[in-house]
Image (tube, helix red, strand yellow):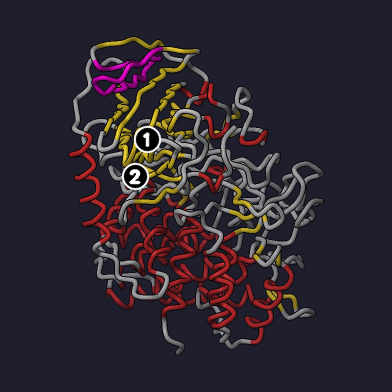
Amino acid sequence: MSGRIEDYALIGDLQTAALVGRDGSVDWLCLPRFDSPSCFAALIGDRSHGSWRLAPAGAGPCTTRSYREDSLVLESEWRTATGTVRVTDFMPHRDRVPRLVRIVECLSGSVEMRGELRLSFNYGRIDPWVRRTGHHRVAVAGPDSAWLRVPPGVHTYGSDGSTVSDFTVTAGRKVAFLLTWQPSHLHSTPLADPDQALRATLGRWRDWAGNFRYRGEWRDPVLRSLITLKALAYAPTGGIVAAPTAALPELIGGTRNWDYRFCWLRDSSMTLSALLRGGFREEAAAWRKWLLRAIAGDPSDLQTMYGVAGERVVIETEAAWLPGYEDSRPVRFGNAAVQQLQLDVYGEVVDTLHLALLAGIPMERHVWSLLRALMGYLEQHWREPDEGLWEIRSSRRHFVHSKVMSWVAADRAVRLAEATGLPAPVERWRAMRDAVHADVCANGYDRRRGVFVQHYGGSELDAATLFVVKSGFLPPDDPRVVRTVDAVRAGLDHGGFVRRYDGRGDGPGGDGRHADGPGGEGHSGGGRRGPGGSAGGRPGPDGLPGGEGAFLACSFWLADALVATGRRPEARELFTRVVALANDLGLLAEEWDPVENRQLGNMPQAFTHVALVNTAFTLAEPDP
């Protein structure tokens, strides 16, 4: 039985990531990349699907845990009747192969320890053949091999498919375990010194965090969010995944269980904007190079998401052999939202290129050529319906948010042309900007209620309409803006937080919010986000049954809108409440269940941490 979603800590090496529970169990790890099949999948299955527990024998959750300094080095301590022990977990920045290092250190007395390593490759479907060689236990299955380096003096033995280690540590003694992955055709693994790897890892994180430039009162949650976002960036290419996990449910027992281990252009763009605000330019430059490679070709072939190296084929499948997190099925890998049309993505990409220029990253001519190609396509297609930000699985609609972000694309393209002097059809872009603005105001606005709605011809509220003020589409003192902010605040409230949009769910929260495109969204493809409701029931207006929790990013967006409309104290109060939902390590998933008081969805979620960072910076700025 896996722990609550908020019970997990994140460690990683900037190419993949693992989730470690309070009980000392690594329950999720995909190797060698974020989107590779897992070797530990107990998070969405059980122990037989892969895990590695290392803790005092017979102990429960750790007594305390924290990250060391501003890093991803996790320290968990257990205070037992006989002594106190610390387990330090981290993944060194990668040279040749990925490693997971676990250092056991007795701080006082003596403590009997137990390690149980159960490897199961291909998402818990293939149990490896395990053999002993020197100080290693080697597990091999098809193309994968994992090498467990056993410390001298520690006895290991096989038991029911697991490699078990029983040993005792006394005050001052350290014992280090190293798990290394490599292709199975290689016959040995390079050795590494655990203490040296720890020093190097801390040094790398220390150097990186030294660029942090936020000066507000929420220093710790902002920096932890930025560290988390950095951890989701695939270092070899610059691609940024939406989350390191797959199939964590948006409603316990429900069907909205999506795979977020891919690079959504929207999420990546927003992540880069947050990193730039935090003072981190290197990631922006790397992501822009990734973008150019990923979307090279015909602008009409632009996808909503790609693999971490820019792969275009992302096939969604269901893993019938996995029971899912707390029986939430189906478990999905891959994401069908890759097939959707989401016009807002163009606005996010162009806006990020504009932010990069403002941050001092020059606009090269080949980047400018790409931008012009994207704008040429958008000029011809912005009037079309799409699946939108929430990646609905029902029919396409004219979503207000998609149109507003099309306006953003034209507006930022004009600003870029004016700032750089590079050749461009500026008058055409200005005309498009004006046409989109007029179209949204005429068709996306409910004159009877005086508010912007989710889509043309509809009456439903949508938190994404807050972008009419966040993007600069309308000034914050425009009565239409103020009424829309108030309507979202009242009409989408879910236990003091914000749902994504109106829906017809039939459970707590009552509303079916997140749909997701032809594959849903899982961040997309499979359903990325929808409203509260029960796990079953008829499909809602987004095309999916059941509901979801409050969408945490939407609550931060509301705080931004409250600041813009002159209600800073209310924004501050909302921001403080949302930040308080983070776990003891400062990590947030995609959603929050205000009925059961627990986090929901994939974890940690880039979209949520991006919104936290941006709102913190907004609150730190003086009133105009």
State the image quarter where residue 484 is shown.
bottom right
Tell me whether circle 1 and circle 2 mark residues in contact (CB < 8 Å): yes
Could you tell me how many numbered marks the image carries? Answer: 2
Q: Secondary structure at mark 1?
A: loop
Q: Residue at x 79, y 55 (%)?
A: 504
Residue 369's spot in the image, x, y percent? 32, 59
Q: Can you see residue 37?
A: no
Which residues make up the magenta segment?
135-157
Chief SS of the magenta region: strand
Q: Is residue 244 left or right of residue 205?
A: right
Is residue 153 magenta-colored?
Answer: yes
Q: Secondary structure at mark 2?
A: loop
Residue 313's spot in the image, x, y percent? 47, 35
Is disc 1 surrounded by few (<14), some (14 to 19) or many (20+) residues within 10 Å?
Answer: some
Task: Depth check: give the residue in front, 292 or 331.
Answer: 331
Image quarter of the N terminus: top right
Q: Is residue 97 left or right of residue 318?
A: left
Q: Is residue 547 left or right of residue 221?
A: right
What's the residue type where badge 2 is placed? Answer: Tyr
State the residue position of label 2. 234
Residue 502's spot in the image, x, y percent? 74, 61
Looking at marks 1 and 2 on the same chain, the residue that comes earlier in the sequence is marked by 1
State the residue position of label 1. 33
Q: Residue at x 28, y 31 (%)?
A: 176
Q: Residue at x 58, y 60 (%)?
A: 552
Task: Depth check: give the residue in front, 280 or 452.
Answer: 280
Is residue 206 magenta-colored?
Answer: no
Q: Residue at x 52, y 19 (%)?
A: 125
Q: Is residue 563 left or right of residue 502?
A: left
What's the residue type where badge 1 is placed? Answer: Arg
Image quarter of the C terminus: bottom left
